[in-house]
Image (cartoon, rainbow, N blue to C red):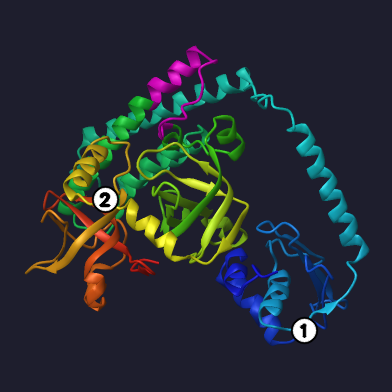
Amino acid sequence: MKHLTEAYVDSLALNSSAIKNGKDLVKKNSFPLLCQSEDGTIIFGECKGSGKDPYQCSVDVIKEGNPVFRCTCPSRQFPCKHNLGLMYAFTSGKTFTIAPIPQDIADKREKAEKREEKQKEATATDAPAPKRKPNKSSLFKKITAQLEGISIAEKLILQLVTSGLGSLDKKALQTADEQAKQLGNYFIPGIQSALREFILLFRSELEREKVYPVSIEQLTILQTLLKKSKEYLSSRLENPEMPIDAQTTLEEWIGHAWQIAELRELSRVRNNIDLLQLSFRSYSDPARGEFIDEGYWADLQTGQIHITRTYRPFRAAKYIREEDSVFQVVHAKELAVYPGELNTRVRFEEATYREAGPQDFQNIQQAASKSFTDVIKQVKNLIKNPLSDKHPVVLLRYAEIKKTATCYVLVDEHGKQLPLANIPYLHEVTTSLIAMLAKPHLENQVMLVMFEHNWANNRLEAQPLSIISANEIIRLLY
C-alpha cells in the first residue's frame, strides 16, 4: 500500500469538506477497530456514527489506481467520510491489526473478479468490438428537435441585433434570458450556454463601451455556431448513416457529452500514458450553471499540452468529486482523447501515481517551442476560427525575462519579445509573481503560458502559468 499517501487520499475526496470531515474522524479517535489483510490489499474497520452500531467500512486496493470503497452508512457521497477517515488513519501511522478479510467483503470481491473475467473473455477475440447502431427513430426525433431549437435561437439573436445592442435594458435582457432557458428542451445545451453567455455579458457590471467589442466577438461565435450546426445536423437528418463528427469540436459546441465508450469506438483512446500536471484552476461558469475544475497537463511521451475538465452543476456539486492540483506523475492505463485542436481535452479513470524525476522535467523542456515567431503565427491562425479555442496554452523556452517600463516580456533566443499580462479570462493575477522568482529562473527556462487577444490594444498577450526548470515546476497558477 505504498501508493496510499495522504496526497492520494486527498485526490479521492469529493471536496475539501469531505477531506476535513475524514481527518476529523481520525483526530476524534472515532475508529475503535482498524484492521488490514495479511497481503496488504485491503483495510477495514469500524467507525463510530450517529446510530447505536458503528459503521463497517473498507477500502479494497487489490487493483492499484482503482480502489473499491464500501461502507454501511447511508451517505450519498462516494467515498464517504468514513472511508476517507479509514485511509487517513492508515496514512497517519495508526496501528492496523492483521486480520482475516470479512466474509461479506470476500464474497463481493469474488463476484467482482468473476464479472471481470467474463468481460475479458468477451473481449479476448481479435475481432473489433461491434459498434453500437443508433436508433434511427430516436436520432430523427432528436435532430429534428435540435434544428427547431436552432431556429428559435436564430430568431432570438435577430431580434436582439435588430433592436440594437444599445437598447438592451434590464427588461429586454430578462425576456431574452427567459427565452434562452427554453432552449433546454431542444438538446442543444452548448448553444444555449453560448447564448446565455452573450446575455450575461450585458447584465454584468462592466461599462457598455467595454462590453461592445467582446459582444461582437461573441455574436460572431454564435452566428458561426448556428450556421455550422444547422448545416451539419441537416446533413445527418438527410443521411442517418452519416457518422458523428469526431474530428472537430462542433458536437461539443452543440452540447454533446462524449462517453468513453464512444471514444473507444472512434479509436480516440491511448494506453499507458504518463502525464504531469503543470497548472490547475477552479472557476464557476454562470452561463452553464456549473463549477469547472480545469487542469493543464504535459504528455511526457509527446510533449503535447492536454486539458482535463470536470463539470459540477451548481445543484449537485456536493455529490461530485471536486478535482484538485496533482503534483505526481499520473500513469493512465487508458487515456480518452476528445476531439480538438492544439490543447485536446483528455480523460482518465484508472491511474497510478509516482514522484516526478529529472527525466520527466527534461522531457517537458525538450517539448517547448524555441521560436516565439512560429508559436505566435500558430496561435493567430488558430484563434481566427470563431469556434476554435480562444485561449490556447503553449510551452515556451525563453532566453530571459525582462522588465520594461510597462510590463514583463519574454525574450527568445532570436531576440523576439512576447509581452506578459494578466488576461481577463483567467480572473487570476500571476504576472506580478515574476518579481519573486530567483535569478536562475529568469534565464534559459521553460514557461507554460496562456494566450489571449487583447481587443483594447489589438495585440496578442500571454499570461504565465508555470515555470519548468531541470528539477522542479514553479506553479504561478495552481
**In the depicted view, which residue is nearer to us: 424 or 57?**
57
Q: Which secondary structure, mark 1?
A: loop
Q: Residue at x 25, y 52 (%)?
A: 451
User: What amino acid type should be assigned to the residue bearing mark 1?
Assistant: Thr
Identified at 16% across, 49% down, the residue is: 455
Given residues 223 and 79, the one toward you in this image is: 79
Residue for badge 2? 369
Earlier residue among tags 2 and 1: 1
Q: CA distance from mark 2 to mark 1?
A: 51 Å
The residue at 57%/62% (across/down) is 353
Residue 265 lies, in percent from the top left, at 59, 30
The residue sitting at the right extreme is: 103
Q: Is 335 situated left or right of 344 in this image?
A: right
Quadrant in the picture for the N terminus: bottom right
Where residue 329 sits in the image (x, y, percent)?
A: 51, 61
Question: Residue 251 lies in what quarter of the image?
Answer: top left
Tag of residue 95: 1
Q: Nearer the viewer, residue 81 or 327?
A: 327
Q: Quadrant of the C terminus?
A: bottom left
Residue 89 to residue 183: above or below: below
Q: Position of residue 317 (x, y in %)?
A: 56, 59
Magenta stretch contains residue 246: yes
Q: Describe the element under mark 2 as helix, strand or loop.
A: loop
Q: Does residue 292 appear anywhere in the picture?
A: no
Residue farthest toward the bottom in the current orientation of the protein: 28
For disc 2, the neighbor class at 10 Å (few under 14, some 14 to 19, many from 20) is some
Look at the image and give the residue range highlighted in magenta: 229-250
Towards the viewer: 453 or 444: 444
State how many labels appear. 2
